[in-house]
């Protein structure tokens, strides 16, 4: 019985030491959200977060009910792969079916400082993927703008154009968001 207790105590010490070592490594090599510059704000949920650790929400947001065009400039991103999506800002609740079939055209282009296209997603929103939670939160995304490896020191320009607005479009606003990192990320 004593042997099992000793093994259990040893296992606890090994796990605790491992967690301390990971925390020290994260502190030494951590992304500093204070390095972000540009049109938005960074949220860092911390090293131990499950799910997206980083969320960079670009501002101002755009309307899906009227033609709109926004340009965002930024740099100082984390080194983790990031995905770009359009997060629905208003609680859409029961609007899922209407949002899923919108014909509103969106053209999203991310380019580096030299003008090289990093990703582009263009098409009517009905051709985009619509992420949805039970609480009515949602976001549109396209495969070409996922798992992006962006350089921290590089300036990026994101241009989002909303046109050919669907007459059925609700008065909903979206914000471009870069998200990634965390324990479930590659």
Image (cartoon, rainbow, N blue to C red):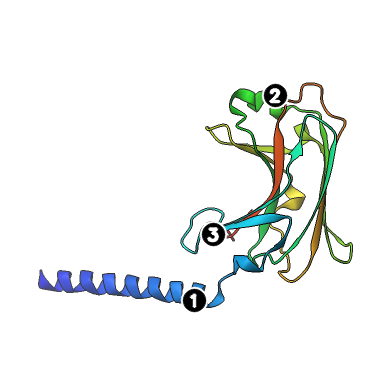
The image quadrant that residue 62 belongs to is top right
Q: Whole-percent x and y of residue 8?
A: 22, 69
**Residue displayed at 52% across by 78% down:** 28
Instruction: Say whether disc 3 or disc 2 marks the residue closer to the N-terminus.
Output: 2
Relative to residue 18, is residue 69 drawn left or right?
A: right
The Cα atoms of the two marked residues, 1 and 2, are separated by 46 Å
Mark seen at residue 182: 3
Q: Which residue is mark 2?
A: 98
Which image quarter: residue 105?
top right
Would you say residue 161 is visible in this rendering?
no
| Mark 3 residue crowding within 10 angstroms, few (<14) / some (14–19) / many (20+) | some
Residue 99 x, y percent position in the rendering: 70, 28
State the quadrant of the N terminus: bottom left
Q: Kindly indicate whether the residue at mark 2 contacts the one at mark 1 (C-beta within 8 angstroms).
A: no
Q: Which label sits on residue 117? A: none
104 or 12, which is in the foreground? 104
Whether residue 49 is situated above or below residue 163 in the rendered picture? below
| Residue 184 appears left or right of 123 | left
Q: Residue placed at 60% from the left, 32% from the top?
A: 91
Residue at the far top in the pictured view: 168
Q: Which mark is residue 25?
A: 1
Q: Give the CA distance from mark 1 to mark 3.
A: 15 Å
Q: Earlier in the sequence, mark 1 or mark 3?
A: 1
């Amino acid at each position: 019985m004593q042997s099992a207790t000793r093994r259990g105590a040893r296992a606890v010490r090994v796990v605790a030491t491992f967690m301390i070592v990971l925390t020290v490594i994260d502190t030494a090599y951590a992304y500093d959200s204070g390095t972000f510059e540009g049109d938005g704000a960074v949220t860092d949920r911390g090293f131990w977060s499950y799910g997206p650790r980083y969320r960079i929400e670009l501002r101002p947001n755009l309307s899906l009910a009227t033609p709109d065009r926004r340009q965002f400039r930024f740099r100082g991103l984390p080194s983790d792969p990031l995905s770009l999506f359009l997060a629905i800002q208003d609680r859409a609740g029961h609007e899922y079916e209407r949002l899923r079939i919108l014909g509103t055209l969106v053209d999203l282009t991310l380019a580096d400082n030299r003008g090289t296209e990093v990703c582009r997603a263009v098409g009517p929103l009905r051709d985009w993927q619509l992420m949805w939670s039970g609480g009515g939160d949602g976001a549109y995304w396209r495969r070409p703008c996922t798992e992006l490896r962006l350089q921290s020191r590089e300036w990026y320009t994101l241009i989002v154009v909303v046109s050919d607005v669907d007459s059925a479009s609700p008065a909903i606003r979206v914000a471009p968001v870069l998200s990634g990192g965390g324990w479930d990320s590659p």
